[in-house]
Image (cartoon, grey):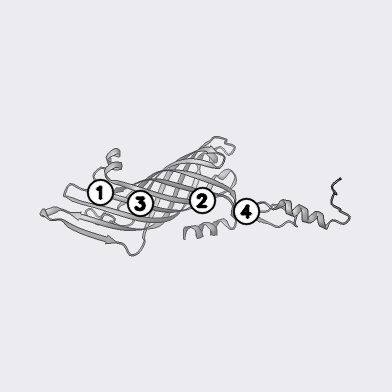
Amino acid sequence: MALMVIAGLAIPHITNAQSWGGGKKKSALWEQWSININGGLTSFFGDLSKFDTEIMEKLTQESGPAFSGILTKHLGHHKKFGVSGQLLYGSLKGENNSKVSFQATLIEYNFHGRVNLVNLISPDNRSKVGINLYAGVGQFMFKTTKYDRRNNENIVKIKDTGTPEFLYFFGMGASYKVMPSIEITVDVAMRQAQNDYLDDFVKNDNYDYYTYLDLGATYSIDSFKKSNSYYKRSSVKGRIPGYLPMRRRR
C-alpha cells in the first residue's frame, strides 16, 4: 500500500533528457532510490509502563527486539526530500506495580515524507554526514498477552486485533557515508496509537504509544534502468547515408 502511494507521487516527476533515438522523455521514476535495512528496539509507553523517564530501565525492561525495511524515492537535486514506505516488526513488554504485565508483538506498515536538513541548508554540501527529519501515517496490527496476578490469581488473557489500527509518527536520524553508495544510519521515532488497547489495560483513557530506536545501513540506487546510449549511437550511425563502418586493418 505504502509503495503504491510512493509510485503515485513520483510518476509526475519527469526529466526532459534528450536521447540519440529521437528525443524521448526519460522518466525520473526509476532514478534516485535507496533501501534501508535496520534493527533495534521498540519501547512501550502506556498504562503498563513505569520506566518512562529512566532510559536504561526502559530499554532493558520495557522494550523488545525489532527490525524493519524502508524503501525511499528521493526527490529533487542533492536528495533534499524523499517519500518512503516502511514495514516494521517489533515486540513490546511492560508492567505496573499492581502485578499486571503484558507482552506483545506488532506488525506496522507506513508511508512518510522526509527531509535531509544538511542538504537543504547547504545544497553544495560534500559532507559525509546527514541529518534527517521525517513524519507520516500508517497502520499496525498487534497480538497482546496480559498476565494478571492480582488477588492471588494468575489470569492470562490474549488480545489479537483482527483489523489494522491507525497511527501517526515522527522521528529523526543521522547518517554517515562509508562508501559512495552505502551509509550507516541511526534513527529514533515515536509512534502514537489511536487507542488504549496495546497493553490490554485501560486505566487513564490515554492513548498508548511506542518508540523505535534502530541502527541500520542504506544502499543507494542511482537508477534501476541501465543506460543504453551505446546502442542508440550505433543504431543512428547505421542509418546515416554514406556511413561505412571502419574495417580492421590486416
Labels 1 and 2: the sequence-earlier one: 2
Labels 1 and 4: the sequence-earlier one: 1
Quadrant of res 151: bottom left
Marks 1 and 2, how far apart at CA: 33 Å
What is the tally of numbered marks visible in this picture? 4
102 lies left or right of 8: left
State the residue at coordinates (43%, 46%).
Answer: 38
- Residue placed under numbered mark 4 in the picture: 225
Residue 90 is tagged as: 3
Labels 4 and 2: the sequence-earlier one: 2
The quadrant of the picture occupied by the C terminus is top right
- Residue placed under numbered mark 1 in the picture: 94
Labels 2 and 3: the sequence-earlier one: 2
Secondary structure of residue under mark 3: strand
108 lies left or right of 51: right
- Residue placed under numbered mark 2 in the picture: 72
Q: Are marks 1 and 2 in contact (CB under 8 Å)?
A: no
Q: Is residue 138 above or below residue 134?
A: below
Q: Amino acid at mark 1?
A: Gly
